[in-house]
Amino acid sequence: MSESLTITQRRFGIDLTFVFGPTQLDYTYSDPSSERRFSVPYEAINVLQPGGFVDKRNRYPGRFVVGIMLAYIAMAAIGSQLNISSGVIVFAFIAARAGLYYFAHLNGWWATSYTVLPLTPPPPASGNLPVKVIDDKDGPRILAELKARWRDRIRARYGAVNLSNPPQDERNRFAWLREHGVITEEEYDAAIREIDAADFKAIPDLSNLN
């Protein structure tokens, strides 16, 4: 899986960009106050033990205040045309908007749910920030892509039998690879046969000692 792919997620002022390269992910996390970019090899992304996180902070207070100011100007103009006190109109509008704002906050309308993937080890540029994936319509696609590329990298690095290692260590390694879907059952059986054959040859022939 060598082709590049870019997916961007946006929600309430948060922008996440995933650039899938051949061997690593280029990740960007951006919010209204900061931005962080870093690259991480797929094998360093812990796709096997994802966590969850819900951010209930509303990142639109500035826009809310701007909305109030624009509403004040509009209502003042309307009030002057209708001979209604602009102060009364604006007060009612602000009270209603503030009530809606508070109600939305309490009910989590602005909450953002994430799947969190720890990094081991975290790259220096990450500032210990994990890879976050917003739980929206693109979330499952991003997670599936990360898992597929993680499997490809693990397979490329650890999918060949190394006869210089202790045989039981190799058996355990290939059992782990099979358990986590990195190799197939047939590939596991072939690796075990190769390990067992080499292990058998390593047993000294003691038949001529009698």
Image (cartoon, rainbow, N blue to C red):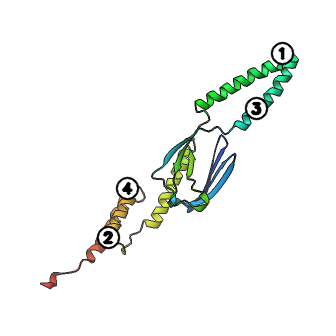
State how far apart marks 1 and 2 are (Cα).
89 Å
Label 2 SS = helix
Residue wearing tag 2: 167
User: Which sits in the foreground, 176 or 109?
Assistant: 109
The mark closer to the camera, 1 or 2, is 1
Q: Where is residue 65? Give x, y as percent.
A: 75, 33
- Horizontal side of 99 relative to 188 (left or right) equals right
Q: Where is residue 128? Give x, y as percent.
A: 57, 56
- Horizontal side of 64 relative to 166 (left or right) equals right
Residue 139 lies, with reference to residue 110, above or below; the image says below
Residue 195 lies, with reference to residue 132, above or below; the image says below
Q: Do the residues labelled 4 and 1 touch (CB within 8 Å)?
A: no
Of marks 2 and 3, which one's residue comes earlier in the chain? Answer: 3
- Quick one: quadrant of the C terminus? bottom left
Q: Residue 84 carries which label?
A: 1
User: Which sits in the foreground, 24 or 98?
Assistant: 98
Label 3 SS = helix
Three-letter amino acid code at disc 2? Answer: Pro
Q: Which image quadrant for residue 114?
A: top right
Q: Which mark is residue 179?
A: 4
Q: Which mark is residue 67?
A: 3
